[in-house]
Amino acid sequence: MHETDPAAHEGTNPQTASNQLEDRLEDLEQITDGALAYMSLEEMLSELLERIRSVLGVDTAAVLLLDEDRRALVARAARGLEEEVRQGVQVPLARGFAGRIAAERRPMVIEDLSRADVVNPILRQRGIRSMLGVPVHVEGRVIGVMHVGTLKPRLFADDDTRVLQLAADRAALAIDNARRSEQRSVTEIMQRALLPAALPEIPGLQFSAKYLPAGTGIKIGGDWYDVFQLPNGRLTFVIGDVVGRGVLAATVMGEIRTALRAYLLAGHDLGEMMELLNRLLLSIGGNRSATLAIAELDLESDELEAVSAGHLPALITREGGRSSFMEQGTGLPLGFSSTARYQTACYPFGVGSTLLLYTDGLIEKRGESIEKGFARLTDAAERAFRGDESSFADRVYRALVADASFDDDLALLAIESVALDDTLELTLEAHARVLAGLRRTVARWLASRGFDAAERFDVTTATSEAAANALEHAYGIRDATFDVRCEADNAGITITVRDSGRWRDLQPGQSGRGRGLEIMRALVDAVDVKQGEEGTTVTLRRNFSRTAA
């Protein structure tokens, strides 16, 4: 490969050569003037390369920026070689012209491209004959390569190299800042899109969360949390931390979040789901890894089932303010080993309990053992249990904020189990997917009123039938909502299901749902159906049994 270190080429008149160099250096001021700092990365690079072409009198100019995760240079801007960008040219480190410049951190010249071994075929296709390239570096680290080329053979002089290197050096900081700003914006947009827009409203539970990205630079990581309900009515709480920073970490976070929901919605249990996620990350490659903790809450039994993939242990604070960590059900982080297995563990989660899921940015402190971080968190949670009217997550965060370094992202999710009132009111989407959650919520409310398991089954089944009739007969496929109101008095409970449509059929024999009224009347003490122009109301009454009374 005919590459050389740029060598000095003697001129016929030293004074003339010196004047020409001074003129070029003056022209260089135009290349890196302050106006470039106010342009987008693409605009800045395009303008920069056009000025370089003019100053050096070359036919092509291009910038390739280093993608550290892929260990490759990616064509980001070009003039005269626009195909490099459109075709997404990538040059591995230490290979080809640009790859060797980046790896060896020095300028290089190709005097005759037709006799050189190049990775990028576009260079030959465009008829490039001679090339000069220099590394682009900031604070001792290479961030890319800038190269120019000519359609006719040219002996690039030492002055050419000095001008191009000086242009690269003076533009490097602006390029790096623009790229970092761009990456940060993209990462923040991705994270905002992937984090829950709002936490759900579930009777008997209070949710609160905090998320703060790292304070400076492209330090935003892959911290995230999620809360959603499964088709069986169980609630799922998730917190995770992807290894790495920037766009790649946010991308991996999105992959895990989507796959996790898909696996659980397909019916896999927590242990199986973790193993599937682990195999997924290993199959994707690229050293993707993450820690993850998941807990599922059965609303009727007030029991948590939890599993962890190398994540920091969740903290449960019981009624009275006593805290303990969930140490069981922990396996290796995702993406580390193909033989990793994950076992779940169960924990009671009765009224008055609070579950705290968090990432390491909340408690880790440089030069301090993790045990001290755990101790601070425990103290903060126990004090937050007896705190003011702000959310539990806010109270914990305020107690620890003085010790947070903000060198890392911080995510915190709190779930509080609170007592249900004598009256329970719900507004639900008119969709079959809400029925399982409705049954479990009503069952939890009935349990708080003293109904045993058999009685809860009867009443929740009748309530579900009334809701299913509202979905099918009142709305069909239209988007709408319906209301459920549960009230308790000294003699029993009354449940009202109200929709804003008209039932098409209340008699058995004409449809599969026609027997809904018969089922309801067999399960509760009284059923009343009222239809009107504004909708249909079904009222169910169940009196206390002697044992419940």
Image (cartoon, helix red, strand yellow):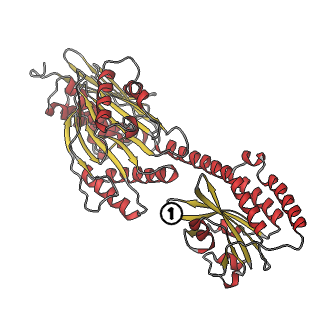
- Residue 276 to residue 182: above or below: below
Residue 393 position, x and y percent, is 38, 28
Q: Residue at x 55, y 65 (%)?
A: 72
Pick whichever, 330 or 150, lies toward us: 150
Quadrant in the picture for residue 482 = top left
Pick whichever, 8 or 234, lies toward us: 8
Please tell me how crowded label 1 is: few (under 14), some (14-19), or many (20+) other residues with Cα within 10 Å. Answer: few
262 vs 24, left or right, is left
Pick whichever, 235 or 400, lies toward us: 400
270 vs 158, left or right, is left
Q: Quadrant of the C terminus?
A: top left
- Residue 13 to residue 329: above or below: below
Pick whichever, 423 or 504, lies toward us: 423
- Residue 210 to residue 117: above or below: above
Q: Residue furthest left?
A: 547
Can the viewer see residue 357 in this picture?
yes
- Residue 328 to residue 342: above or below: above
Q: Looking at the image, how many numbered discs can be counted on the residues?
A: 1
Residue 421 position, x and y percent, is 29, 20
Residue 515 position, x and y percent, is 26, 41
Q: Residue at x 72, y 46 (%)?
A: 37
Can the viewer see residue 538 in this picture?
no
User: Label 1: which residue?
Assistant: 70
Quadrant in the picture for residue 521 = top left
| Amino acid, disc 1 | Arg
Looking at the rendered structure, the secondary structure element under dot 1 is loop
